[in-house]
């Protein structure tokens, strides 16, 4: 078996164990392989080994890579999305995790309407305050979700967060717990429609804790593919 195939099996096993520790059904957790910087050839190895969801950070990179993939796969945009890339993004991706403003949501809605589709999105929230600069502030969430409910070509499916990097995943557990609490609050207060049930949280260093705290989508790069090598110039 290839190293990538072994890694995928090991991570699926760790997801099952984490889910079972908190009496969750492991089938409620989807593994997204984060394929940024990797060649289509390497991604195809992972698809052959059973990976069915991929996550990319950059629209341009995905645009070049996706046509080279050998199997149908569910495609997630997990990196920051610039307004001028939205038109491509709605054609390339099945879900956009990184919606961090109402303006961006409106642009996605408009471009999705042009493309004749309804785009699944997650709201990216900064639950760690000062520690990361990514995502919207918690207090903007209710208003943003209420506005989004009135847009007919996007569907809010849940929340996403990126925890601060740490050697000790226990330290970021409260942030994952907070994201789940926010999801429940938004549902209970009626700010969202049906199907608002996804929590995208957890990366290679902290996915076990994220699953224990309710993650439904985990985003794993290094744990499957090894350390990323960035080519400059
Ligand atoms: C790169 C990246 C990941 C994967 O990180 P690893 O630590 O390699 O698992 C997950 N989420 C986002 C948003 C990323 O940019």
Image: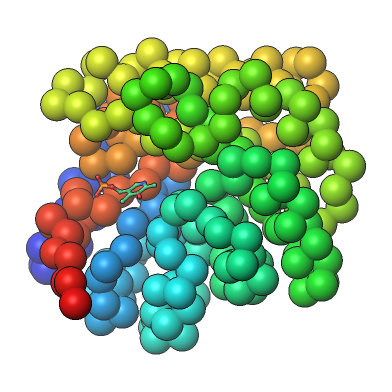
Vertical arrangement, residue 2 with respect to residue 222, above or below: below
Residue at left offset 29%, top offset 72%: 43
**Quarter of the figure with residue 56:** bottom left
The residue at the point 14 percent across, 64 percent down is 229
Number of marks:
0
Q: Is residue 168 above or below residue 63?
A: above
Q: Tell me the quarter of the picture where residue 149 sits.
A: top right
**Where residue 199 sits: x, y (%)?**
52, 34
Q: Is residue 25 above or below residue 225?
A: above
In percent of width and height, residue 100 lies at 59, 41
Q: Quadrant of the C terminus?
A: bottom left
Where in the figure is residue 34, as x and y percent of width and height? Answer: 33, 57
Residue drawn at 38 percent across, 13 percent down: 174
Task: Tell me if residue 19 can be seen.
Answer: no
Q: Position of residue 97 (x, y in %)?
A: 54, 48
Display colour scheme: rainbow
- Using residue 150 as the reference point, say whether residue 142 is left or right of it: left
> Which residue is pictured at 72% across the width and 42% down the height?
102
């Amino acid at each position: 078996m290839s190293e990538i195939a072994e890694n995928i099996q090991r991570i699926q096993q760790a997801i099952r164990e984490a889910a079972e520790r908190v009496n969750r059904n492991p089938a409620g957790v989807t593994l997204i392989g984060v394929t940024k910087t990797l060649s289509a050839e390497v991604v195809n190895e992972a698809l052959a080994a059973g990976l069915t969801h991929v996550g990319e950070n950059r629209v341009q990179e995905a645009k070049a890579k996706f046509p080279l993939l050998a199997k149908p796969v569910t495609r997630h945009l997990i990196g920051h999305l610039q307004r001028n890339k939205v038109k491509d993004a709605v054609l390339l991706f099945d879900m956009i995790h990184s919606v961090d403003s109402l303006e961006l949501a409106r642009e996605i809605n408009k471009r999705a309407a042009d493309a004749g589709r309804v785009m699944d999105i997650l709201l990216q929230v900064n639950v760690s305050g000062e520690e990361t600069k990514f995502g919207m502030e918690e207090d903007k969430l209710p208003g943003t979700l209420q506005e989004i409910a009135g847009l007919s070509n996007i569907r809010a499916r849940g929340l996403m967060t990126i925890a601060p990097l740490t050697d000790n995943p226990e330290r970021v557990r409260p942030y994952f717990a907070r994201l789940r609490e926010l999801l429940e609050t938004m549902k209970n207060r009626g700010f969202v429609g049906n199907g608002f049930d996804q929590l995208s949280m957890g990366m290679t260093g902290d996915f076990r804790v994220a699953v224990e705290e309710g993650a439904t989508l985990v985003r794993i790069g290094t744990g499957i593919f090894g350390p990323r090598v960035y080519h400059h110039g």
